[in-house]
Image: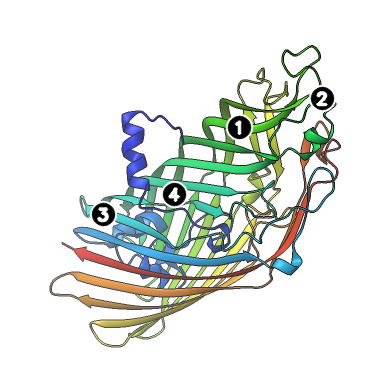
């Protein structure tokens, strides 16, 4: 996110303020968000690609719009809260001289967040439907206390994204529907950390005038596009199958890298302090951070066991291996603050794995107006080899309950859902400086002593509400 926006970008920015970014460990693998619809949350998103209950099908499978009559709207919000904190007794942190870094465990790195959404569909004819959605498909946030022991590797991390999704569906009138949609994504990101000045200060041969630590603040924004296609086939009145796929893209978050109090050594013959002195400098330069958005595919099955009981099953595959590293490029490499001619300011290896999410859910229609839901999902984390303080994460179980009230005569429906994440392991973070060479990622030979290790306690809960209306 740039500090200075054009007027259209500023308008979008104001909209995104209500869609607060979420901690990585609460997400549907990587930085995708599970909580897009309370009606689907009640069954842990099971079978969402084959269960077009309302206008949220714009997101889950645009082909499902063909099974909605007239005009439909759905709107709501989810509240998410996560507890993510390093265990104090597990923390090991060292600076460039190999000395322990003083400070705290960093506190709970995430605050509760609110995630709103809005969807609309309209039946143009017996065979064509159109729709539109506004939602937050991706998000990520962590923010440590300033005296965090791992502050030389992470302070604040934030990704906020909002998607505008026009869609269309076509039905052949014999049980098969096809849909397509565009996701126009506006995203903004922020990376900050404290700069360790101990190595530069120790190597000074002149006066040491540099602060103990500096600070780096990198911000950028971009607009990207992905495409979604979906198919929905009704075998009979009881069973239908949905399949949807989405393309990936790479967002180029462009903005500024601002450095304050960064220690450098003055060259020989420098006036006033002479050569070899350690001084702190401030600088700002243009910066760019590529961010990979994965391709994904989702299969959903909906089967009515009886008139009052429905079984929902789903599976989603996401190609998170696209996210190989978090690289920060400076577009002005001539400034002394970077001292790099390649333009690569920071290289943080990620090398995420592709993931699966498997979902199972059920709906009991207790009365004509009241239904009750339950769901379970096994959600793989893409984070494996490189678990960093910016994204502590592990595999998790998602358990959810939901209820739905509907009034057929008025067309109003209200959904509510709650859920919790049970993590299989404590996240084991291990950070050290890396560089990118022709042969790949390597530990930084110029800084062999810096490091941060810790285990993290993770837990999370969510709640959502949604109102739908059929006109």
The Cα atoms of the two marked residues, 3 and 4, are separated by 16 Å
Q: Secondary structure at mark 3?
A: strand
Q: State the mark number for residue 259.
A: 1
The Cα atoms of the two marked residues, 1 and 3, are separated by 48 Å
The Cα atoms of the two marked residues, 3 and 2, are separated by 70 Å
Question: Tag 4 or tag 3, which sits nearer the N-term?
Answer: 3
Which residue is painted at 39% across and 46% down in the image? 163
Q: Secondary structure at mark 2?
A: loop
* Pair 1/3: label in front: 1
Question: Tag 2 or tag 3, which sits nearer the N-term?
Answer: 3
* Pair 3/2: label in front: 2
Q: Is residue 55 left or right of residue 158?
A: left
Q: State the mark number for residue 229.
A: 4
* Pair 4/2: label in front: 2
Q: Which residue is mark 3?
A: 121
Question: Tag 2 or tag 1, which sits nearer the N-term?
Answer: 2
Q: Which residue is mark 2?
A: 206
Q: Residues within 10 Å of mark 3 (few under 14, many from 20)?
A: many
């Amino acid at each position: 996110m740039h500090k200075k926006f054009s007027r259209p970008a500023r308008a979008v920015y104001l909209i995104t303020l209500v869609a607060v970014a979420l901690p990585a460990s609460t997400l549907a693998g990587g930085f995708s968000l599970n909580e897009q619809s309370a009606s689907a949350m009640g069954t842990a998103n099971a079978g969402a690609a084959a269960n077009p209950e309302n206008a949220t099908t714009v997101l889950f499978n645009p082909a499902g719009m063909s099974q909605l009559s007239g005009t439909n709207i759905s709107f709501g919000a989810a509240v998410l809260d996560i507890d993510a904190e390093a265990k104090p007794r597990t923390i090991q942190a060292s600076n460039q001289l190999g000395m322990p870094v003083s400070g705290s465990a960093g506190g709970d790195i995430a605050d509760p967040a609110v995630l709103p959404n809005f969807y609309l569909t309209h039946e143009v004819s017996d065979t064509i439907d159109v729709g539109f959605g506004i939602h937050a498909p991706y998000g990520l946030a962590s923010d440590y206390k300033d005296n965090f022991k791992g502050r030389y590797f992470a302070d604040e991390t934030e990704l906020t994204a909002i998607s505008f999704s026009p869609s269309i569906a076509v039905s052949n009138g014999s049980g098969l529907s096809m849909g397509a949609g565009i996701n126009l994504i506006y995203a903004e990101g922020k990376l900050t950390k404290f700069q360790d000045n101990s190595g530069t200060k120790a190597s000074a041969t002149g006066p040491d005038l540099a602060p103990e630590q500096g600070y780096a603040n990198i911000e950028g924004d971009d607009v990207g596009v992905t495409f979604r296609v979906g198919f929905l086939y009704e075998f009979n009145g009881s069973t239908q199958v949905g399949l949807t796929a989405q393309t990936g893209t790479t967002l180029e978050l462009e903005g500024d890298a601002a450095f304050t109090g960064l220690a450098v050594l003055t060259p020989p013959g420098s006036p006033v302090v002479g050569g070899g002195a350690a001084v702190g400098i401030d600088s700002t330069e243009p910066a760019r951070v590529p961010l990979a958005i994965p391709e994904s595919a989702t299969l959903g099955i909906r089967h009515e066991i009886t008139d009052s009981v429905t079984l929902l099953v789903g599976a989603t595959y996401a190609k998170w291996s696209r996210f190989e590293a978090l690289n920060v490029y400076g577009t002005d490499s001539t400034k002394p603050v970077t001292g790099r001619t390649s333009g690569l300011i920071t290289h943080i290896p990620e090398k995420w794995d592709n993931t699966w999410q498997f979902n199972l859910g059920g709906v009991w229609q207790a009365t004509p107006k009241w239904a009750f839901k339950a769901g379970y999902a096994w959600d793989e984390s893409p984070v494996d080899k490189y678990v960093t303080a910016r994204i502590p994460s592990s595999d998790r179980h998602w358990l959810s309950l939901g209820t739905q009230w509907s009034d057929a005569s008025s067309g109003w429906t209200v959904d509510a859902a709650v859920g919790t994440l049970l993590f299989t392991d404590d996240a084991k973070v291990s950070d050290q400086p890396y560089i990118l060479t022709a042969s790949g990622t390597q530990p930084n030979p110029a800084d062999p002593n810096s490091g941060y290790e810790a285990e993290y306690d993770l837990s999370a809960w969510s709640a959502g509400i949604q109102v739908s209306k059929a006109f």
